[in-house]
Amino acid sequence: MKNEAKTQYLCHPRLRFVIMHELGIAQNIMEIVRQSVPEGLARDIRKIRVRVGQFAGVVPDSLDFCFGVMAGESEMPRAALLIEEVPTACRCRGCGREFEMEELVFLCPHCGGTDLEVISGKELEVVDIELVDHGGEAL
Ligand SMILES: [Zn+2]
């Protein structure tokens, strides 16, 4: 109990929130992997491909870091994330055109309208899981 107060301010509360956020997502990914891969094969997991939308509010580097730390202490110590970033696509309600957002600026490049609908870029999904094939080369 005495030691708790000392660790309380290790980092800025906002920073801690950000890290916790990606930690939670890393945990979710690990859960999905556990449900998809039979228990005995966990040690053979090498790469987990995930699609992360630019608009999903996830910092890929943080997610990668959090997952790496968690995986290292889990039953899948050699698992690593392969993060594919999905750009944000929008549809303008003003002129009806669709476009990809380079940066998160909510402005239609065609008509300058601001009434936009996000049609992709919120993805956060596990695409596939790569295991080592004992019979052949490790990929
Ligand atoms: Zn427009």
Image (cartoon, helix red, strand yellow):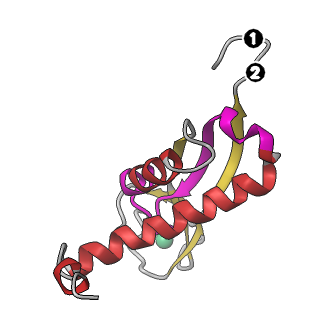
117 in magenta? no
Check disc 2 and report the residue beneath it: 133
Which quadrant of the figure contains the N terminus? bottom left
Q: Quadrant of residue 103?
A: bottom left
Mark 2 Cα within 10 Å, few/some/many (few <14, many 20+)?
A: few
In the image, residue 47 lies in the stretch drawn in magenta: yes
Residue at point 57%, 39% (across, down): 79
Q: Residue at x 40, y 72 (%)?
A: 20
Q: Quadrant of residue 40?
A: top right
**What is the spatial separation of the Cα atoms under label 1 and label 2, in whole angstroms?**
6 Å
Amino acid at circle 1:
Gly
Point 37% across, 51% down: residue? 61
Q: Give percent across and percent down for residue 92.
A: 53, 73
**Where residue 62 sits in the image (x, y, percent)?**
37, 56
- The span picked out in magenta is 40-64
Residue 112's place in the image compared with 44, above or below, is below
**Which residue lies under the disc numbered 1?**
136
Q: Name which residue type carries label 2.
A: Asp
